[in-house]
Image: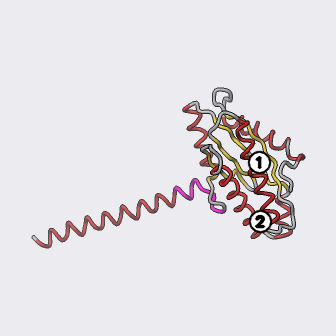
Amino acid sequence: MKIFVFAILFTLFALLVFIFVLLKIIKALYKLAYYDFLTGVYNRRYLAGYMQRLAEKSEAVCCVMLDVNNFKQINDTLGHCIGDKVLKEIAAILQKAIASSDMRGFVARYGGDEFYMVLHTKNKFLVKPVINKIKLAFEQFYFFASMPHKISCSVGYDIYDPAKWSSFDMFERHIDKLMYKHKGTKLFMP
């Protein structure tokens, strides 16, 4: 009888260990699937899924797309290690700008040196102070990090309303055009 009880307890313990390990694996897979490995912010896959869920709920948000100007110059002259540090700092700046605003939102690395911010507001004029915080943070980073290259971004932003746009892909092309329209203006230039 004691062996039978011991066998049951051992089996239950083994099952609990298995479930614990399985949950750890699921958490690691989720992180691999939806987070950018370099910056720690969400990735483009997460962004696409999130926007799909918003479209299904017919919920409008403000999207901000940022592209680091002349980032290739940083990588080419300072090396990819420094370039990676700059990308991490940019991600942190964007997260802090959202956290210090009164809006819910998140940052996603869109690809390369492009980032996306999703802000839960239907008023794009409320986004201007967030962009100004980013501008100030870029200027401070350039100054305090003693970067030999000026760090600036081009920005495009608009309201994504699923009722107005037939797909998020069409909206992405729209906001991309807005961003590249500002590429020459060097919106964030210390």
Residue furthest out toward the bottom: 3
Magenta residues (range): 30-38
Disc 2: CA contacts within 10 A as few (<14), some (14-19) or many (>=20): some
Position of the C terminus, as image quadrant, is: bottom right
How far apart, in angstroms, are the residues tagged by discs 2 and 1?
23 Å
The numbered mark at residue 83 is 2
Instruction: Give me the residue at 70% from left, 62% from top.
Output: 88
SS at mark 2 in the image:
helix
Residue furthest out toward the right: 184
Q: Is residue 20 left or right of residue 169?
A: left
Q: Is residue 164 left or right of residue 27?
A: right
Disc 1: CA contacts within 10 A as few (<14), some (14-19) or many (>=20): some
Question: Based on the displayed image, in which of its 4 quarters is residue 24 positioned?
Answer: bottom left
For disc 1, the marked residue is: 132
Query: Foreground residue, 72 or 151?
Result: 151
Q: Is residue 46 above or below residue 13?
A: above
Q: Is residue 81 left or right of residue 185?
A: left
Instruction: Give me the residue at 15% from left, 68% from top.
Output: 5
